[in-house]
Every structure is written in structure tokens, then in C-alpha cells.
Image: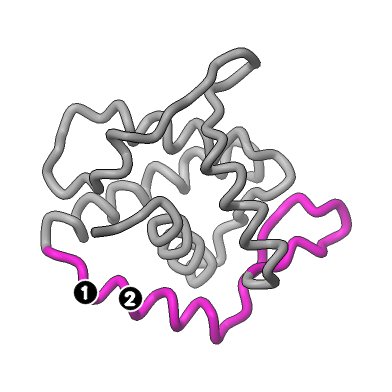
Amino acid sequence: MMTLGDFVKHLVAHLSDEGISIPYEDESPWHNLFYELKNLSTDKGKPEFLNKIRFDWDGPYPKCKKLSEFLHALHWNASVSAQNPRFDTISLPREIAELWGKQLEDLESDEKDFFQHTIELAKRQFQVCHP
């Protein structure tokens, strides 16, 4: 069963491989993405955790505390780096991207389809803030 952490790691690895700018300081694209994923009408390939995560909306965008905590934990434990001039984007060492990317091979067909859809949504969300 895929967890929120697994899903984020796979997404970061895939987007990093494609050279997509991955936001760190401005978390709104992440929260908007996961809010959109949670509210998708399909359950085909959708990881179970998406039905369980909770969002607060007491600011300009929906916010998931667990997602914020995980993004910061990735940086704190040195899995990812955000040491660009303003800590605005994530960079991932090549070795870690390869390790996390290999784990995607074990997904079922429906899960792979859902993940591919997620990648397209992420590209759209992330480009809004980091064109």
C-alpha cells in the first residue's frame, strides 16, 4: 500500500528526472495538487491515503499538515536539497532519484495510470508558480 511519503518521493524523483522545477518554499502548489487529487471522482488506481488526508482551508489555499511535515522532513534528513538562493525549489541527488524511481516499477497498472495523471497535474500546478 502506497503512503503519502512514498507518493511524494516518487513524484519528486520523476519530476526531477524531467527537469521540472519543484517548489519548496511556496508549498501552495503541493497542497493544491493533493487537494485536487483527493477530490478526483475516480478511485481507479487512487492510493488509499488520498481518501484519508485532511485539509484545513483557513488561508488562501487548502493546506494538509501531513504533507507540509513530510516536505520539510525530506529537506531536514538531507534526502532533498533546497539550498538554491532563496530555498524556493527542491533538487534531488541523482542516486536518490534513481532509487526512488525504481520503486515505481512495482506499481499495478491502474496505479501507474493514476500516477501518470498525477505527474501531468503536478507539471501544471508547479509551472503556475515556477514557469
Q: Which residue is pictured at 56% across the width and 28% down the height?
A: 63
Dot 1: element: helix
Mark linked to residue 125: none
Residue 62 in the image, given as x and y percentages of width and height: 53, 23
How far across and how far down the image is residue 106, in percent?
21, 74
Q: Amino acid at mark 1?
A: Asp
Residues drawn in magenta:
80-108
Query: Which corner quadrant holds the N terminus?
Result: bottom left
Rate crowding at label 1 as few (under 14), some (14 to 19) or many (20 or more) other CA atoms within 10 Å.
Answer: few
Q: Which residue is mark 1?
A: 106
Residue shown at the point (37%, 48%) measured from the top left: 120
Residue at 46% x, 82% y is 98
Q: Which residue is mark 2?
A: 103
Q: Amino acid at mark 2?
A: Gln
Location of residue 28 in the rendering, given as x and y in whole percent from the top left corner: 61, 33
Q: Is residue 87 magenta?
A: yes
Q: Is residue 104 above or below residue 25?
A: below
Residue 76's image quarter? Answer: bottom right
Q: Secondary structure at mark 2?
A: helix
Q: CA distance from mark 2 to mark 1?
A: 6 Å
Using residue 37 as the reference point, say whether residue 57 is left or right of it. right
> What is the quadrant of the C terminus in the image?
top right
The answer to whether residue 28 is magenta is no
Task: Give the total of numbered labels.
Answer: 2
Q: Residue furthest bottom?
A: 95
